[in-house]
Image (cartoon, rainbow, N blue to C red):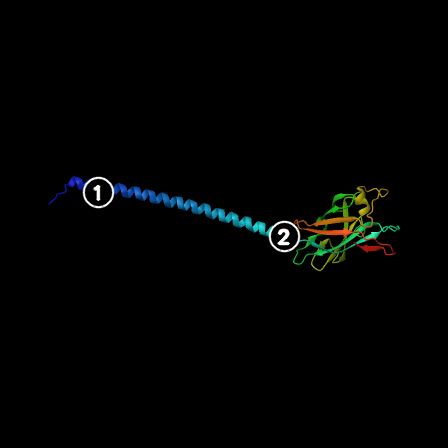
């Protein structure tokens, strides 16, 4: 029979206690690390969710909110060559679009001789501007609506462009550059939320007595 002395028994117990404490410390450290990692993951997920919501809302605004061009027309100058000196664009809101402040629209005009960013003039609302900034502005009036500058569902606005002065790059009425038959131009209409709609215009080869022609 082998006898175990008291000193050996106590020594083994001390070593087992030290191992147990070490394991407990490691376990607590692992729990703390896991908790910190979980906190980081939760914060990251919240940030990504908020970013995704913002991006989704911005994408919806760009797709849904905006205008669509119903029809376009050009005013014949009165000469025999069928040149066009002013342009009208009838616009309405896209389906499901919110209210659109027409005075905050911006239009990019790209024509045969000029590329110009146009802003709302606010003067002479029923005709193309003849003011000193006629080559950098456009006008607008309601054809269907309640009399304000807000384009709502069921309403239409007419946008007026003094093309002969936009193309010449000069507001001086003595310096005009109308569009001729076969000339082309593009208008890009951008609302305040950033949505853009484009209309492509081509002056027809026309000879007749009409005042306006479809573009």
* Residue farthest to the bottom, as pictured: 154
The residue under label 1 is 13
How packed mark 1 is, by other alpha carbons closer than 10 Å (few <14, some 14-19, many 20 or more), is few
Quadrant, the C terminus: bottom right
Contact? badges 2 and 1 (CB < 8 Å)? no
Considering the numbered disc 1 on the image, is that residue within a helix, a strand or a loop?
Answer: helix
Q: Considering depth in this image, is 95 or 200 the residue closer to the camera? A: 200
Q: Is 75 rendered above or below residue 114?
A: below
How packed mark 2 is, by other alpha carbons closer than 10 Å (few <14, some 14-19, many 20 or more), is some
Query: Going 83% across and 55% down the picture, which residue do you hit?
Result: 212
Query: Going 48% across and 47% down the picture, which residue do you hit?
Result: 43
Residue 13, image x, y percentages: 21, 42
Q: Is 8 rendered above or below residue 56?
A: above
Query: Going 41% across and 46% down the picture, which residue do you hit?
Result: 35
Tell me the number on the disc at residue 61.
Answer: 2
Alpha-carbon distance for marks 2 and 1? 72 Å
Q: Considering depth in this image, is 147 or 6 the residue closer to the camera? A: 6
């Amino acid at each position: 029979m082998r006898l175990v002395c008291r000193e050996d028994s106590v020594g083994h117990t001390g070593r087992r206690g030290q191992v147990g404490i070490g394991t407990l410390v490691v376990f607590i450290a692992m729990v703390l690390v896991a908790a910190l990692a979980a906190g980081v993951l939760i914060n990251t997920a919240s940030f990504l969710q908020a970013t995704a919501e913002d991006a989704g809302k911005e994408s919806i605004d760009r797709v849904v909110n905006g205008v669509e061009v119903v029809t376009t027309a050009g005013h014949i100058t009165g000469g025999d060559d069928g040149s066009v000196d002013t342009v009208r664009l009838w616009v309405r809101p896209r389906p499901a679009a919110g209210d659109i402040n027409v005075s905050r629209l911006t239009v990019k005009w790209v024509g045969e001789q000029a590329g110009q960013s146009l802003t709302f003039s606010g003067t002479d609302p029923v005709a193309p501007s003849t003011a000193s900034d006629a080559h950098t502005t456009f006008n607008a009036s309601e054809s269907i609506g309640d009399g304000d500058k807000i384009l709502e569902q069921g309403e239409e606005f007419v946008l007026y462009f003094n093309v002969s002065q936009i193309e010449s790059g000069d507001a001086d009425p003595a310096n005009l550059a109308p569009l001729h038959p076969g000339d082309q131009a593009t208008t890009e209409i951008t609302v305040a939320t950033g949505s853009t709609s484009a209309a492509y215009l081509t002056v027809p080869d026309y000879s007749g007595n009409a005042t306006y022609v479809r573009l």
